[in-house]
């Protein structure tokens, strides 16, 4: 059974802080790694789809890196804002197995 | 542009009653379609996916079934609900294979089985 682990489970930062969290996945038979943002009362929104070892993707203040050989991906948020408060999910594999997410809370 | 509709938004059903959740996609043809569930304290779990009309793959054995009667319609059903079926159900679509295409989610259905 594929296991996707995300850490930390939750995180609280101050406005302006930069932060990062981790998604760990099996390093064998890699296809793709997805990141999603899930805000309260909304549906999950795709941030990145990463397919190649060493991939780096960026969307505004959010970026992600991928290491398929060691089985991890980092999501970075630079200068966190209150509107970044959400649960960030990663998903792995052909059937997209989701982790439980990292819930980020940003205080102003 | 593409849109996905999922209904109802909330549902309270007694144990043993039937279930039907519907999802439709507009603005795209031959999408891949998915049903996910988030149970309390757990991550999103893939229940079913479909790559075409009448083609359904089940990821987890359970009390639920799915059907795709039309290209852009995906239905989640149960003949008799269990308490363990409670959760948040999300429908999603992708333009291609899920492993290299982003998923686009509906707004979800909160199901409470009493």
Image (tube, rainbow, N blue to C red):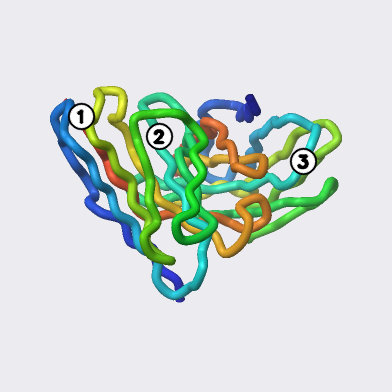
Q: Are marks 3 and 1 on the same chain?
A: no
Q: Hey, which quadrant is residue B4 in on the image? A: bottom left
Q: Which residue is mark 3?
A: A30
Within 10 angstroms of label 1, few (less than 14), some, or many (20 or more) residues?
A: some
Q: Dot 1 lies on which element?
A: strand
Within 10 angstroms of label 3, few (less than 14), some, or many (20 or more) residues?
A: some
**Circle count:** 3
Q: From the viewer's perspective, is B21 left or right of A47?
A: left
Q: Dot 3 lies on which element?
A: loop
Q: Name the front one of labels 2 and 1.
A: 1
Q: Which mark is residue B113?
A: 1
Determine whether A56 is above or below B114 in the image: below
Q: From the viewer's perspective, is A32 left or right of B103?
A: right
The chain letter for the residue carrying disc 2 is: B
**Residue A104, visible in the rendered structure:** no
Q: Are marks 3 and 2 on the same chain?
A: no
């Amino acid at each position: 059974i594929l296991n996707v682990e995300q850490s930390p489970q939750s995180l609280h930062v101050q406005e302006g802080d930069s932060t990062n969290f981790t998604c760990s996945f099996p390093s064998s038979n890699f296809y793709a790694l997805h990141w999603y943002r899930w805000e309260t009362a909304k549906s999950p929104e795709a941030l990145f789809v990463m397919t190649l070892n060493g991939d780096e993707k960026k969307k505004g203040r959010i970026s992600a890196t991928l290491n398929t050989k060691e089985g991890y991906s980092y999501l970075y948020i630079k200068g966190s804002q209150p509107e970044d408060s959400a649960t960030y999910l990663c998903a792995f594999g052909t059937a997209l197995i989701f982790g439980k997410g990292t819930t980020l809370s940003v205080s102003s | 542009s593409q849109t996905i509709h999922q209904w109802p938004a909330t549902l309270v059903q007694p144990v043993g009653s039937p279930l039907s959740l519907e999802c439709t996609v507009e603005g795209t043809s031959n999408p891949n379609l998915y049903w996910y569930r988030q149970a309390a304290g757990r991550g999103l779990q893939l229940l079913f996916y479909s790559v075409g009309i009448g083609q359904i793959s089940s990821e987890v054995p359970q009390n639920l079934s799915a059907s795709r009667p039309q290209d852009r319609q995906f239905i989640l059903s149960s003949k008799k609900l269990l308490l363990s079926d409670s959760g948040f159900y999300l429908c999603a679509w992708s333009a291609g294979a899920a492993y290299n295409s982003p998923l686009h989610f509906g707004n979800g259905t909160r199901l409470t089985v009493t």
